Image (spheres, rainbow, N blue to C red):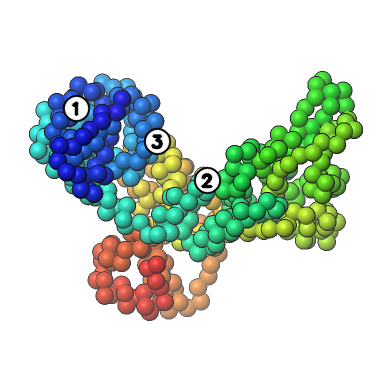
């Protein structure tokens, strides 16, 4: 349970932000509670992994203490490691018995996810100093986020990640179309996140309290699509032993997402058109018109205008669906987002990685930036997850991603162009890795800030 605190001295702004998360046996921290409170720390306590996960999901912390029980860690180390590794905004300090420092699993755990460690019995003055340093570093890291990245982490769009101009455009369009109730058509290649965009529209709309129902029109057998969408009455066909409510009816009051609408059979396109026009449906085998209040969002990777020309899609249905349109960019069109996406995937699936793996090498980030990603974000997710498992070093290399022998289709004509392109790509990568900080990027590249600014000016690059 939480330990509530009331500082004995006036609290300034920094002290008001000093919320400390403690995970471990209550009796270990009990002797220090009064002193910690006097120093302005507000404590929240979790003694089980489930309690820790609940606190992490419901509150924001910048500093945490984990009292490592060697026996518990040897038995349940992975669950503890994955839980704290996912809270990457927190600077964690480990507490452990002095003799446990020599245990290899604990050494791996501490080196992998902790900011610092202290051995028992605790030197409280030294621990307070560490807590202050950890809080300062956490606040610097939070302030260092560029405005676009802050928006990515807090924009409410379900797991949509990206700070590029292309994704900023998508975010703006989502906000605009979410405010009205008209049909939306989302276009883009497979794997670009069309369903995520549809969910984001739903979550920001007046229908957010209703149900979001997704139907993949290309994944259902043709003979079942009508029943799945419109439902059926008992006895309407062989095997219809009872009435079934269709997806459209289930989505009443909410949003119906029709993915791969271009694969919908022509016969059913007429039924869908009638529903969009009249807002009523008939179940298969039924004769009663049923009014349904639902917003329709459709998505396709198919060129529907070409499909209309070829007679595979109804023109009148196309114009009913395409009242508002959002085009999702391909990953190769927003390469500046690749480092951010890769880090997001790395954090999200942290429980799948090897203990030694800390992140991505510069070569891996460079290779990812020069690959064309035909499978888009979906392919990036698969390759990063594979690399997290296969990597046996500290940093993921191109070979771990399966990209070491893959060449980009982008070609360079002259040596001068090749040199300029290499400089631009390297600067882009360094700035992305260092959250657009020119000072940090220059240090990573081994040049002075003046030199880096000169190169940026030469190539027309900006750090915003």
153 on left or right of 233: left
163 on left or right of 25: right
The residue at the point 41 percent across, 49 percent down is 343
Circle 2 residue: 158
Q: Quadrant of the C terminus?
A: bottom left
Q: Mark on residue 437? A: none
Circle 3 residue: 58
Earlier-in-chain disc, 1 versus 3: 1
Circle 1 residue: 29
The residue at the point 31 percent across, 56 percent down is 143
Instruction: For the residues labelled 1 and 3, say whether their Cβ atoms are less than 8 Å apart.
Output: no
The residue at the point 35 percent across, 41 percent down is 60
Q: Going by the picture, which residue comes out furthest to the right?
A: 287
Q: CA distance from mark 1 to mark 3?
A: 22 Å
422 on left or right of 21: right
Q: Nearer the viewer, mark 1 or mark 3?
A: 3
Residue 334 versus residue 68 in the image, above or below: below
111 on left or right of 48: left
């Amino acid at each position: 349970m939480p330990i509530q605190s009331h500082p004995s001295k006036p609290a300034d702004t920094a002290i008001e932000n000093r919320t400390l998360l403690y995970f471990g046996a209550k009796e270990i921290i009990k002797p220090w509670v009064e002193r910690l409170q006097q120093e302005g720390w507000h404590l929240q306590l979790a003694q089980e992994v489930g309690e820790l996960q609940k606190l992490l999901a419901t509150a924001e912390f910048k500093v945490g203490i984990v009292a490592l029980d060697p026996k518990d860690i040897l038995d349940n180390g992975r669950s503890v490691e994955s839980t704290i590794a996912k809270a990457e905004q927190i600077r964690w300090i480990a507490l452990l018995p002095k003799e446990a420092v020599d245990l290899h699993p604990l050494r791996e755990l501490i080196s992998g996810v902790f900011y610092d460690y202290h051995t028992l019995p605790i030197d409280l003055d030294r621990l307070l100093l560490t807590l202050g340093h950890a809080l300062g570093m956490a606040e610097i890291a939070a302030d260092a986020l560029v405005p676009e990245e802050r928006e990515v982490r807090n924009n409410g769009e379900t797991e949509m990640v990206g700070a590029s101009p292309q994704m900023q455009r998508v975010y703006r369009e989502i906000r605009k179309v979410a405010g009205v109730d008209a049909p939306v058509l989302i276009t883009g290649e497979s794997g670009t996140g069309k369903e995520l965009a549809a969910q984001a529209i739903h979550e920001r709309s007046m229908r957010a309290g209703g149900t979001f129902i997704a139907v993949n029109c290309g994944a259902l057998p043709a003979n079942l699509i009508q029943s799945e969408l419109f439902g059926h009455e008992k006895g309407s066909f062989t095997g219809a032993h009872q009435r079934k409510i269709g997806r459209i009816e289930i989505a009443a009051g909410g949003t119906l997402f029709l993915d791969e609408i271009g694969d919908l059979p022509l016969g059913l396109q007429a039924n869908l058109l009638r529903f969009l026009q009249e807002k009523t449906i008939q179940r298969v085998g039924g004769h009663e018109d049923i009014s349904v209040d639902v917003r329709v969002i459709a998505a396709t990777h198919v060129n529907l205008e070409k499909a209309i020309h070829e007679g595979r899609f109804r023109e009148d249905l196309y114009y009913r669906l395409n009242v508002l349109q959002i085009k999702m960019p391909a990953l190769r069109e927003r390469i500046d987002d690749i480092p951010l996406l890769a880090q997001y995937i790395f954090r999200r699936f942290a429980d799948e990685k090897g203990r030694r793996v800390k992140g991505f090498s510069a070569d891996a980030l460079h290779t990812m930036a020069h690959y064309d990603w035909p499978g888009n974000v979906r392919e990036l997710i698969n390759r990063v997850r594979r690399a997290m498992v296969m990597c046996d070093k500290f940093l993921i290399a191109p070979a771990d991603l399966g990209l070491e022998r893959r060449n980009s289709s982008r070609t360079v004509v002259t040596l001068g162009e090749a040199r300029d392109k290499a400089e631009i790509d390297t600067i882009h990568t360094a700035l992305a890795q260092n959250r657009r900080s020119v000072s940090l990027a220059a240090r990573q590249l081994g040049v002075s800030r003046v030199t880096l600014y000169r190169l940026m000016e030469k190539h027309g690059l900006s750090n915003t």
